[in-house]
Image (tube, helix red, strand yellow):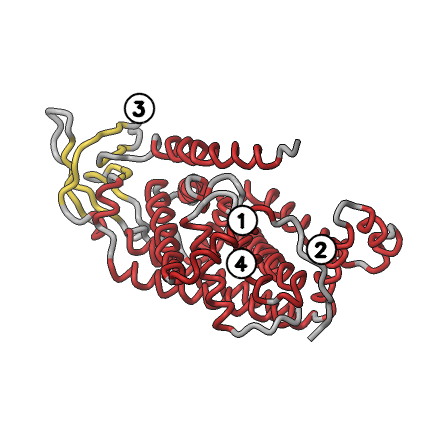
């Protein structure tokens, strides 16, 4: 009896539990009341006060009213470096999550949406070029449509059928003569994006050092593993030495795996196009980072605390962690990552969670636009069939592999 469907059903039920557990752990560390932390004075302990803020905390001067009587109100001022002090005593101000979300600047949200659409355009263009290399005659508009549908399934219908699987099934259906090529283009699109993300994060983390010191080793190992794996896989000498194709042919579905293998090797013959795809990946990531930075500014995160290069380190690491197949859409995992990374550089973890949640909601809004395609009655039966194909899709049918 095949236990794979049973395991998938169990994981589908477990995923919401995992998401809720992670979100609960993050929420337990968030301020749901305004808080003031007074630094230790003369060897004493820090004082943690709860209360309410009067004034705009983004403008650098507020009055904090402690809830514990008979404590007196405290006037807080923020210096140019982003640090707070209460009547000359170093302090840390932690606005409640409600206050943080209520005070977000709409202009920053608009800039973030513009940046995220720009990032999406880079990503669509990258996949379109990869499809062209594989010999799939797809217009840019078709790549745009399929990408949006994939985003819709990934964000709105979490479960067994992820966005990449739906993109692959749709691409295969629209290129019946090059099914293996269309499928591999989706895999290559994701791998190139991931390698560019890890490389970007690694370079900046090594350059910045400081609070990112503890991230250097895991990021370096991840990047080296991806690069070495790619070099070993594409090495003609090594493949001949281990008789790679013969070994692959002996595996279950060996002939289909050979077709996929040949489709992958098509990209090694076009190094210039692969470099262009890598450059488009960097454009995609830089635009997304700019969007997250716009959200940070909209929420009032001082640029003196988290500047551009800190975001260039934070966002790729958080996105890599969010990409782990733990929770649908990265919910919970991404919030925990942003909370940790914001605190790592000396910012408020609550701000990191607010930025992460809003970032994910922006992606949700963008992905929902793909749902407009689903409103067409003629597409409902087709999409139900795609869902079934995506769940049971183990390998592509046999296809011819040629360079365009």
Q: Does residue 45 lie above or below 225 as drawn? A: above
Q: Mark 4 points at which residue?
A: 167
- Give the percent coordinates (x, y) of residue 63: 14, 41
Q: Residues within 10 Å of mark 2 (few under 14, many from 20)?
A: few
Residue 40 in view here: yes
Report whether 351 appears left or right of 274.
left
Label 4: state its secondary structure: helix
Label 3: state its secondary structure: loop
- Give the percent coordinates (x, y) of residue 320: 53, 48
Q: Which residue is drawn at 81% across and 51% down?
A: 249
- Give the percent coordinates (x, y) of residue 125: 52, 70
Q: Mark 3 points at which residue?
A: 44
Q: Which of labels 3 and 2 is toward the front?
A: 2
Q: Mark 2 and mark 4 in contact? Answer it, CB < 8 Å.
A: no
Label 1: state its secondary structure: helix
Q: Quadrant of the N terminus?
A: top right
- The residues bearing labels 4 and 1 have C-alpha atoms spaced at a distance of 14 Å
In this view, the residue farthest toward the right is: 241
Q: How crowded is mark 4: few (under 14 residues within 10 Å), some or many (20 or more)?
A: many
Q: Which of labels 2 and 4 is toward the front?
A: 4
The disc, 3 or 1, on the residue closer to the chain's N-terminal end is 3
Q: Which residue is drawn at 58% across and 56% down?
A: 190
Q: Which of labels 4 and 1 is toward the front?
A: 1
């Amino acid at each position: 009896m095949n236990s794979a469907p049973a395991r998938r059903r169990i994981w589908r039920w477990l995923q919401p539990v995992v998401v809720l557990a992670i979100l609960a752990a993050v929420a337990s560390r968030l301020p749901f009341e305004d808080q003031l932390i007074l630094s230790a004075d003369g060897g004493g302990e820090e004082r943690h006060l709860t209360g309410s803020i009067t004034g705009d905390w983004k403008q650098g001067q507020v009055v904090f009213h402690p809830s514990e009587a008979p404590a007196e109100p405290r006037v807080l001022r923020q210096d140019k470096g982003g640090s707070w002090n209460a009547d000359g005593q170093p302090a840390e101000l932690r606005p409640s999550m409600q206050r943080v979300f209520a005070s977000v600047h709409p202009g920053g949200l608009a800039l973030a949406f513009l940046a995220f659409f720009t990032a999406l355009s880079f990503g669509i263009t990258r996949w379109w070029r990869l499809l062209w290399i594989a010999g799939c005659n797809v217009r840019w508009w078709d790549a745009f449509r399929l990408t949006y549908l994939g985003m819709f399934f990934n964000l709105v219908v979490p479960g067994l059928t992820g966005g990449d699987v739906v993109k692959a099934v749709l691409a295969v259906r629209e290129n019946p003569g090059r099914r293996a090529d269309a499928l591999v283009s989706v895999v290559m699109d994701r791998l190139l994006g991931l390698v560019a993300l890890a490389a970007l994060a690694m370079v900046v983390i090594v350059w910045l050092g400081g609070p990112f010191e503890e991230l250097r080793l895991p990021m370096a190992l991840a990047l080296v593993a991806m690069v070495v794996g790619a070099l070993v896989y594409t090495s003609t000498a090594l493949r001949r030495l281990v008789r790679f194709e013969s070994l692959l042919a002996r595996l279950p579905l060996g002939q289909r795996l050979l077709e996929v293998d040949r489709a992958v090797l098509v990209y090694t013959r076009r190094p210039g196009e692969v470099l262009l795809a890598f450059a488009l990946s960097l454009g995609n990531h830089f635009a997304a980072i700019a969007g997250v930075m716009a959200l940070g500014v909209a929420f009032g995160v001082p640029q003196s605390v988290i500047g551009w290069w800190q975001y260039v380190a934070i966002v790729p690491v958080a996105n890599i962690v969010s990409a782990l197949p733990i929770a649908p859409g990265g919910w919970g995992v991404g919030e925990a990552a942003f909370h940790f990374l914001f605190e790592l550089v000396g910012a408020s973890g609550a701000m990191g969670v607010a930025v992460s949640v809003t970032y994910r909601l922006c992606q949700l809004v963008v992905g929902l636009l793909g749902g407009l395609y689903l409103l067409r009655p003629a597409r409902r039966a087709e999409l139900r069939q795609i869902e079934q194909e995506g769940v049971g899709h183990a390998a592509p049918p046999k296809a011819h592999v040629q360079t365009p």
